[in-house]
Amino acid sequence: MDQRAIGMFDSGVGGMTVFKELMSSLPNEDIIYIGDTASFPYGGKSKETIIELSKKQIQNLINKNVKMIVIACGTATSQALKEMKHLFSIPIIGIIEPTAIYLKKENIKNIGIIATAGTIRSRGWEEEIRRKIENSHIQSRACPLLAPMAEEGWIDNEIAKLVIHEYVKDLKDIDALVLGCTHYPLFQRLIKQELSEKVKIINTGKMVSNEVKEYLKKNHLENEKAHQPNYKIYLTDTECNFIQVASRLVQDKTIIKNIEKI
């Protein structure tokens, strides 16, 4: 048993889609979330910058005595996870490997991936999926406008609909579409409208929450079953639309009203 919190970070509000899944699957666990809103967006930054930003937020979480860390960001996972595991001894989980494991388990081989430009450029998703799944066929698309639109709360208007149409219209003959940026589940309804009904939309937050749950159980790090969870959210810059978008997503005023600046 371990009463310490699970730590998480993302460049902004996108990681709250993972936060929401952790709340659901791990109802007895405390969670500390950092939204690095002062450095948003991560998607267009260099690998060296992403590594430095990730290092800073992981150290912030370690200073808050967390028991493990979730990199709830596709860009940071693809470009900094390996380096962070070398630098820190604390358990660190990203969003890519748990999702690739799920795709293999489900025997899904025709896969579409949408993510930030930095993530697509890194080929992190493609390399991990090909390591796990032989003869996989992958179509990747960079969607640089979606994360900024999510941060603005433009997730269900006509502009969002047109942008999503342009990004996914050429994805053909896929069985699943991986939402390779944690902001993208905010557009899931519109994305689904653009695809064939047979295409499975993969929300990485669900795979990550399952991985975290399994890791905690295997390593005897679970909190008490009767524990009432405590959630804490920190932002590196509070002059943003994080609260508005997160409120719609989590729908828990108690959590959102306690946001602090770090």
Image: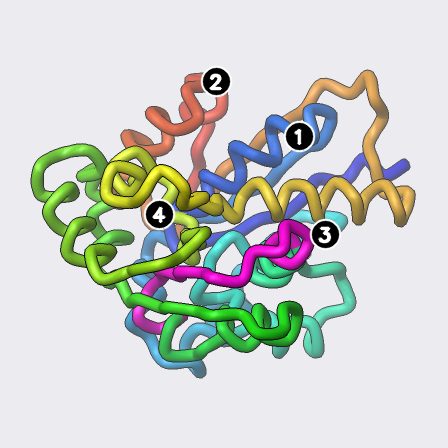
Q: Tell me, for residue 25, which label it has, or none.
A: 1
Residue holding disc 4: 184
> Residue 137 location, x and y as percent?
47, 70
Residue at coordinates 54% horizontally, 62% vertically from top-left? Answer: 109
Res 63 seen here: no
Q: Amino acid at mark 1?
A: Ser
Q: Are marks 1 and 2 in contact (CB under 8 Å)?
A: no
**Magenta-drawn segment:** 102-119
Which residue bears the numbered disc 3? 68
SS assignment at label 3: strand
Q: Amino acid at mark 3?
A: Met
Query: Is there CB contact under 8 Å for labels 3 and 4?
Result: no
Q: How far from the left and from the top, in percent, is residue 78? A: 50, 71
Q: Position of residue 106 (x, y in %)?
A: 63, 50
**Could you say which is closer to the camera, residue 240 or residue 186?**
186
Q: On the picture, is 261 further left or further right than 88?
A: left
The tag on residue 102 is: none
Q: Quadrant of residue 89?
A: bottom right
- The quarter of the picture where residue 115 lies is bottom left
Q: Quadrant of the N terminus?
A: top right
Q: Residues within 10 Å of mark 3 (few under 14, many from 20)?
A: many
Looking at marks 3 and 4 on the same chain, the residue that comes earlier in the sequence is marked by: 3
Q: Nearer the viewer, mark 1 or mark 3?
A: 1
Inter-mark Cα distance, 1 to 2: 19 Å
Badge 2 element: helix
Left or right relative to 67: residue 98: left
Up the image or down, 200 lies above or below 252; here it is below
